[in-house]
Image (tube, rainbow, N blue to C red):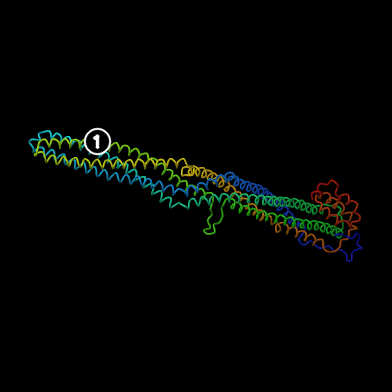
Amino acid sequence: MGLASSSAAFATPFQATSPAPGVAQIGARLESARQVVETRFLEAGDVLSRAVEGVGSLIAGLDAIRANLDAETVTTTTGELAQAAQTLKSLPDNLSARRDRVGELVKFSDGLAGRIAEMRQHLAYLRVFAINIKITSGGIAAAGPEFAIFAQEIYDCIEMGGAQLDALNTDLMGLDHTLRGALAHEQDLARHCAELLPAVPDALTASAAAIADHHARIASVAVSVATLARDVQKKVGGGLAALQIGDITRQRIEHVQAGLKYLDETAEISALDAEPRARAHAFVHRLLGAQLSAMTEDFEREVARINQSVVGMAADAVELLRLRDLASGQGSDQMGGAETNFLRNLEGNVGQALGLVGDMTAGEQAAEEVSRSAAVSARELTERIAGIQNIRADVQMMALNTTLKCARIGETGKPLGVIAVELRAHAIHLEKSAAQTTSSLEGLFDAAEALGRSEAGRSGDDGKAAAAASVLSGAVARIGKAGDGVDTALDAVARQGADVVDLLRRAAQRSDLHKQIGSVLDTAANQLLDMAGDAEIPTDDIAPALHPLLARLAKQYTMAQEREVHRAMTEGLAAMEAATEVAVAAPADDEDDVLF
């Protein structure tokens, strides 16, 4: 405010007021405010600097998440999953065809068991007739020992045929056990397929779409993160710039403290009489009060900027955390409220599908083994049947010789002839059963060969279970690696994001400096102004005494605002005008005027 240059300009004479709180109390308030400024703004600056680093790490973590599932991986994996899904859907048809072929082998095995039983029955009859020949010939004197010898040879031949038949039956039981085991495995696979299809391929198809959607979401998130990062950087820059008010305020408080000290030290003022000295003190108190008022106004304005920046940064940090969840495929499930990670779900779906095609591949391999085993067994059984057929020929020849000998011995040989005829008849029945068995074995061999050819053809088809297993193995490896990478990045991002939010919240709490600093400065300013009073202060007679103090104050100013206040408050001092212009005027290259 401008001051009159002479006492004649005042309507009422100046009356000094007694300092209510005292200069000492004002000094204590200013020192308290200065210390708070010095500590709190250093803390706030450190918090904001760490927050800047935290936001950078947060963004880097999100970039790492995006890098763990790049476009090439997405394209390859989605294509493979779609292909595998189609393969899985075709598995029941392939399985049904193979199960029918294995079932056909089992039917041939059942038929062979019936033929074995027939041949065993025919051999039992032949054995009985051979024994009858031996017994009957013993009661015919004309038969002599020759019939007994023939009967023993026939019996021995039949026993050999029985041994061959037992071996054949043992081999057939082993083959039947293998075939029924294969059929049971095929039926278990069919039930397993019914449980998992079409749910598994549908899940794979959905997972492939989820991967593509995830990648698109990541790209969108990257854009949002970049925008938020720029906003955070601007706010942090504004906040850090505004923090300069702390250093500025500290210096200006020190200047006011120095002014109060100078007031007591200036000999020219101390030498004045009581009334002029009181006016000099009032003038300086009013000047210092004006400096504190201007300082408080600037401080409150910049602190408001700091608060606004910090609150904005805290909100952005929370948004960055929300974007992190979106990028990772996590979020609240509307039904259950549980967090899910689609990459882990996808890995589980692929693992389930891989288990299914692994079972199918094992089934294909088992079917190939069964077909080879059945074909080999059919050949071996056919050779055994040939041996039985040879025995049948021997028995028939022996029976024919017996018939001829019976004719030579006349009427007494007729009983032996009847037995020999029956022996030949059952040998023919044995021949028919053996022929039917051979035919069944040929059918078994052909069916086994057909099964082997079909499985060999499927093993070379890229669209079948073995190929699907290879495709899914590659996909699950890539998905697992991506999932691990994303989990690692998310852990880092979660920790860093929480730290950033905590730092910015702390900064927001600590940046509320009005109560601890602003209000103290405002109170001190009001106290100084109250001590100066409202009346105009005549300065003509005290100007020379004020000159040394005002010049000393002018030299210590570092802020342009301080100079402006000083100029405004002292421009009415005619005697001081020339001196203060030299001391107060800012030089052309004054860096402080440029910066502040």
Camera-nearest residue between 62 and 153: 153
Quarter where residue 425 is shown: top left
Can residue 385 be seen here?
yes
Residue at x 30%, y 38% (from the top left corner): 382
Residue at x 23%, y 41% (from the top left corner): 430
Q: How many marks?
A: 1
Can residue 270 be seen here?
no
Q: Residue 383 appears at what percent x and percent y?
A: 29, 36
Q: Secondary structure at mark 1?
A: helix
The kind of residue on which mark 1 rests is Asn
* Extreme residue toward the left, this view: 141
**Quadrant location, the N terminus:** bottom right
Q: Residue 550 appears at what percent x and percent y?
A: 85, 53
**Is 182 on the left-hand or right-hand side of 502?**
left
Camera-nearest residue between 509 and 14: 509
Residue at x 45%, y 41% (from the top left corner): 459
Camera-nearest residue between 50 and 5: 50
Camera-nearest residue between 172 and 132: 132
**Is 38 on the left-hand or right-hand side of 407?**
right
**Is 46 on the left-hand or right-hand side of 354?**
right
Using a 10 Å C-alpha cutoff, classify the residue at mark 1 as few (fewer than 14 neighbours), some (14 to 19) or many (20 or more).
some
Residue position marked by numbered label 1 in the rendering: 390
Q: Residue 470 appears at what percent x and percent y?
A: 49, 42
* Extreme residue toward the bottom, this view: 11
Q: Residue 419 appears at what percent x and percent y?
A: 15, 41
